[in-house]
Amino acid sequence: MSLSITIRPVTPEDMREITAIYAHAVTYGTASFELEPPNETEMDARRRALENGGFPYLVAELAGRVAGYAYAGPYRTRPAYRYTVEDSVYIHPDAHRQGVGRRLLAGLIAKAEAGGFRQMIAVIGDSGQTSSIALHRALGFAPAGTFTNIGYKHGRWLDTVLMQRALGDGAGTPP
């Protein structure tokens, strides 16, 4: 029997679980190039900044627990990039390969389109993140390039894979 995944907007009460999920990713993974996990106060400040900027931030619940989260944030801060967002998706280690990432990213794409954004960029830490690359490809992202050996973490050099997806009319019409 498969469990039901609920996708909903983030709340301040989710930050403890989100902080733990991110801490695991920072400590053991290569999806983030941060070297030290931020504390809950910092993670909540980041959440508030995204929400105040009009960016979507979602959580997935599985069996009554936060199983993952996703948000879109500014790709770059200069004004010409204001219609382009970068996505971030993090899944609790116990919830991998259960469809949580796919549901979160699909929901994030829909919210970003509804918010008037036109392009979504995936900046995937490490070319060895084949699951993340496959997830993005399955939801319409195309490869846009790879920066090789630009980050150093866990005793090795890491690539960054860039993928891109048009949102709504993309570049077909003015914003």
Image (cartoon, grey):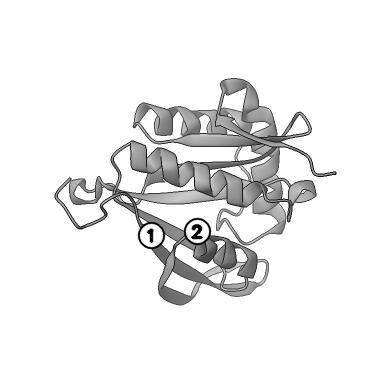
The residue most toward the right is 1
The residue most toward the left is 174
Q: Is residue 4 left or right of residue 129?
A: right
Q: Is residue 166 left or right of residue 7?
A: left
Near mark 1 (Cα within 10 A), the count class, few <14, some 14-19 or many ≥20, is: many
- Amino acid type of disc 1? Arg
| Residue shown at the point (59%, 46%) measured from the top left | 103
The answer to whether residue 67 shows anywhere in this view is yes
Q: Where the C terminus falls, by quadrant?
A: top left
Q: Is residue 128 above or below residue 123?
A: below
| Residue shown at the point (18%, 50%) measured from the top left | 80
Give the label on residue 139, or none: 2
Q: Is residue 14 above or below residue 32?
A: above
Pointer 2 and pointer 1: residues touching (CB < 8 Å)? Answer: yes
To which residue does mark 1 refer? 165
Q: Is residue 156 above or below residue 140?
A: below
Give the percent coordinates (x, y) of residue 132.
59, 62
